[in-house]
Image (cartoon, rainbow, N blue to C red):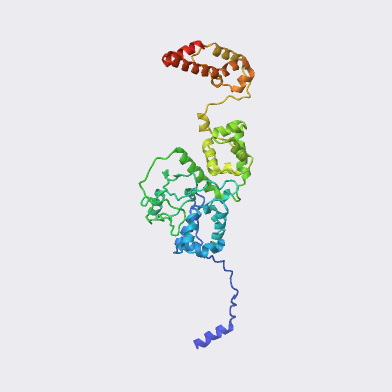
Amino acid sequence: MVMAQYVEEITSSPLPIWDMFIPDIPPRSKLYSLAPLGLNSPLVESLTSYLCRMAYEHHVEVGSLVQHSIAPILGKRYIADSHGRGVSSFLRYASPINGNGLMASDWVKALEALTLRADLAHLTLLIGTNALSQRDLLQPVRQWCPRCYDAWRCRGAIIYEPLLWSINGIAVCPEHSQLLERRCPYCSTSLPWLTWRSRPGYCSSCGKWLGKADDQRLVEEKERYLAETVGDFLAHMPQVLLAIPREGVIQSLRDLIATTTDGNMAAFARNIGRPKTSLWELVQGYFPPSLPFVLQLCYQFHLPLLPFLLGGEQVAPGESPVSQEQTPKRDARCPVDRENVKQALEAILADQQSVPLSMREVARRLDYPVRTIETHFPYPAGKFLAAPQRIANNKASVGKLVCGSGLPRQLALHSCRERS
């Protein structure tokens, strides 16, 4: 009776209509879509480190991942079809994938296609493709902070290699004020950034752990400043949507020259210790500046790196430590105090000195260029220009006296000075 009543209720009520449409399924990546570490921080992960972590998460070696998954995307058939030795040779010279050239761009596109991520360019310096030269951009060998490794391991964090460690000119960890290591403390091997069995935190030669807690050495103020400056630049990279144009850094360089030396390019070149011709070619935009050159300017004039590269803002340099050491030069365009200079020249000429002064020494004492004195006071200047000849004649006379009369050299030199 109960069963019949239940069947009657089912048949009398309308049955629900099922939706048979297949829902939209998000696309699936061929490799794990690992999130990069350290984005928006000075210790953002490098692309070489991301590649090593990707291989570790898939339980394969870096060489195998590159050969079978990445090389076909890159179109490098000679890598995909080669044996282990060919891949190892390629990886040994693959450090430019952290840089700003074509190789870095190709690897970013390949890994983004395999992981379906869109933020892997921030693990390289591709933002400076147009603004910075590829020359002297990256460290040729691997370097690391042993205290960072130890701290991450102690708190159970993921071990990785920051992009900062791969940049040329960076020798200090900004977190620990610790000099970066470049050789394995166990096998003393200098390590490439990528090998077949690379793994962050471990030596790719002997396999030993590279972390250490009690290593502390003093670092220079300049090294710490450069590490902090570049670290701040890396932390703000994701906020810059497009590649930095070359015009920005060129304009900043022009503004810096105008601010510090009133547009005198020769004086600015002397101030920073660079050839004037190279500086002129940079200002004209013939080629982008190298990162070490830009970092030198940032340190010398206390400038932030990212605004200097972007340009568009008034450059306000701080006090230049190099310019403080140099003796300020008189501006050749300033009017000459003829009366005082004339009196000074007459006083020098009237002074019976033991050794005649050269024109260069006179100009140094008066703090005027040699050409300025020769132009305004040709007659006194001629007296000083003849000084080298008189000195040479004195030396010849000394030789004759010493050889002909048997007098001691000092006594002969005194006799010549009396005659001149």
Residue 177, given in percent of the width and then of the height, sits at: 42, 43
334 is higher (above) or lower (below) than 45: above
Image quadrant where residue 274 sits? top right
259 is higher (above) or lower (below) than 193: above
| Residue drawn 49% across the image and 15% down it | 397
Residue 300, given in percent of the width and then of the height, sits at: 52, 36
| Residue drawn 58% across the image and 41% down it | 308
User: Is residue 355 left or right of 377 when viewed as pictured?
Assistant: left
Residue 180, given in percent of the width and then of the height, sits at: 43, 46
Towards the viewer: 341 or 220:
341
Residue 264, given in percent of the width and then of the height, sits at: 61, 31
Farthest residue, direction front: 404
170 is higher (above) or lower (below) than 361: below
Residue 103 visible to the viewer: yes
Q: How many marks?
A: 0
Towards the viewer: 73 or 7:
73
